[in-house]
Image: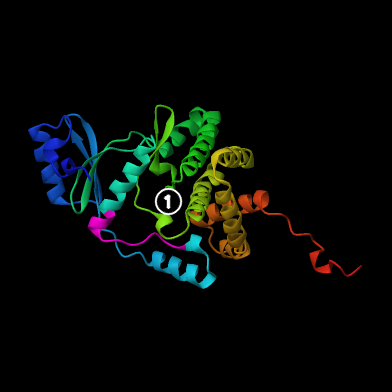
Amino acid sequence: MDGRLNDLSAIPDATPKDIETLLAVLARGARRIERVEMSFGTVWIKRYGTERPIVWSRAQNALAHLFRKPFLRASPRLGRTAMVDREVRRIAAFAAEGLPVPTVLYRSDSALVLSDAGPTVSARLRTLKTADPAGHEDLLVACAAELGALHARKLCHGRPHPRDLFLEGGRIGYMDFEEEPEAAMPLPAAQARDLWLLFLQLVPSALEGETTAGRALSAWQESAPGDALSELCLLVAFLAKFLWLTRLIGRVHMGSDLRRFLAATRYLSQVLLAPRPADASKAGKDD
């Protein structure tokens, strides 16, 4: 690790006043994510170890063990310093592949100071939705295409939500590297889950529905490894078994998460899985 990351005075263009401000904000520890204005621009402070224990991650691992499905596993839970180490390491890995990422300006055992990456893809999509609907759809497709290119580099993000993506020079950039699914499952399974998680957001928000979803899936497939596609088919086949239960629950309360699960999983199952013949149970009876 670059030893300069432990030195606030090594931050490029930082003035003594900037350093004083950062020291005060870091010591205050008010919020997990905090925006700070410096003389040279905006930086973000990200603190670790403030999260409440996540029951869902334990449930994920229990389900993964019960069903013997690695893609259900949660990323390993780590202590504060190890979480900082993980994020710094993953940012460096993406940067080494020439991918746009925030710059790590400073690190301690429990916090990072990161450069501002600019507006997120999520914010850009909100603007395009009314100002340029065609551009909105093209950006969704671009997210899938860039994710496929990422997977071709033997990487995965872990949570490719549009709010964790940004635009830099016409390219999709990545931030928020808290997840590391490839540490809990084979890389192809982690990459398949990446695509499914992106489609949880993409399919419901696409203005042109399945037309855009189809373009996005094709764009991902152009670069994505074949074993990631195979794992995606296995993932979707498993999750599709629960569509009936999801619809049943939805009759009582159709929340946004449930709606996204239904839309994405139903679409992917339709295009990736071979349809079951209606008379499959009768096969061979007339021989």
Residue placed most toward the observer, 175 or 118 = 175
Q: Amino acid at mark 1?
A: Gly
Is 217 located above or below residue 40 in the figure?
A: below
Residue placed most toward the observer, 185 or 277 = 185
Residue placed most toward the observer, 155 or 122 = 155
Q: Is residue 49 in sight in this rendering?
A: no
Q: Position of residue 95 (x, y in %)?
A: 35, 38
Is 68 located above or below residue 225 in the figure?
A: below
The residue identified by callout 1 is 158
Residue sticking out furthest to the bottom: 66
Which stretch is magenta?
73-83
Look at the image and say whether residue 79 sits in the magenta stretch.
Answer: yes
**Residue at x-position 55% and y-position 50%:** 228
Drawn side of residue 194 relative to residue 269, left or right:
left
Drawn side of residue 90 relative to residue 253, left or right:
left
Drawn side of residue 28 relative to residue 92, left or right:
left
**Residue at x-position 43% and y-position 28%:** 170
Q: Quadrant of residue 173?
A: top left
Majority secondary structure of magenta residues:
loop
Q: Is residue 286 in sight in this rendering?
A: yes
Would you call the spot at circle 1 few (<14 residues within 10 Å), some (14-19), or many (20 or more)? many
Look at the image and say whether residue 268 sits in the magenta stretch.
Answer: no
Under circle 1, the secondary element is: loop
